[in-house]
Image (cartoon, grey):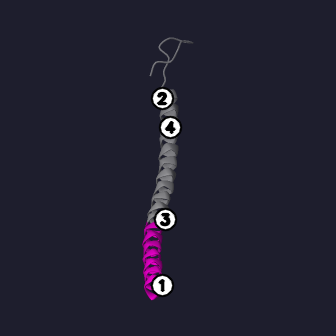
């Protein structure tokens, strides 16, 4: 009977160790996920800022092109 109890105790200890190892690995994965999610959010924010800057430059270029526009003939299209 004691042998059976000892074997069961060893199995319980083994299961506890396996659970601890799996929990540690899960914590590592969760930490890495949170880090990657944070980096993704930062990259998306930088992309939005860059896109906004590009749009501002496009608008300025269009305005600059309109200011430089000199018609070749009165009431004709503008050719920059």
User: Of marks 2 and 3, which one's residue comes earlier in the chain?
Assistant: 3
Residue bearing the label numbered 3: 30
How crowded is the residue under tag 2: few (<14 C-alpha within 10 Å), some, or many (20+)?
some
**Measured from the top left, where is residue 14 in percent x and y?**
42, 77
Residue denoted by label 2: 65
Which badge, 2 or 4, is on the more N-terminal residue? 4
Bounds of the magenta segment: 1-28
Residue at 48%, 48% in the rendered image: 47
Query: Distance between the Cα atoms at labels 3 and 4?
Result: 45 Å
Residue mark closest to the camera, 3 vs 1: 1
Q: Which of marks 2 and 1 is in front?
A: 1
In this view, the residue farthest toward the bottom is: 2
Tell me, for residue 38, which label it has, or none. none
Give the mark, 2 or 1, whose residue is nearer the N terminus: 1
Give the spatial CA distance, label 2 vs label 1: 89 Å
Residue 60's tag is 4
Q: Distance between the residues labelled 2 and 3?
A: 52 Å
Could you say which disc has been placed on residue 5 in the image? 1
| Towards the viewer: 27 or 76 | 27
Mark positioned earlier in the residue sequence (3 or 1):
1
Asked if residue 14 is positioned above or below residue 77 in the image, the reply reads below
Taking the magenta stretch, the answer to whether it contains residue 19 is yes
Please identify, in this view, whether the residue under mark 2 or under mark 3 is nearer the observer. Answer: 3
How far apart are the alpha carbons under marks 4 and 1?
82 Å
Point out residue 11 in the picture as x, y percentages from the top left corner: 44, 77
Which quarter of the rendered picture does the C terminus lie within? top left
| Label 1: which secondary element | helix
| Residue at image point 50% right, 31% down | 62
């Amino acid at each position: 009977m004691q042998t059976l109890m000892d074997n069961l105790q060893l199995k319980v200890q083994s299961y506890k160790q396996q659970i601890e190892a799996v929990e540690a690995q899960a914590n590592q994965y969760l930490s890495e996920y949170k880090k990657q999610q944070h980096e993704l959010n930062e990259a998306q924010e930088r992309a939005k800022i860059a896109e906004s800057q590009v749009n501002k430059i496009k608008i300025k270029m269009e305005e600059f092109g309109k200011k430089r526009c000199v018609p070749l003939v009165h009431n004709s299209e503008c050719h920059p």
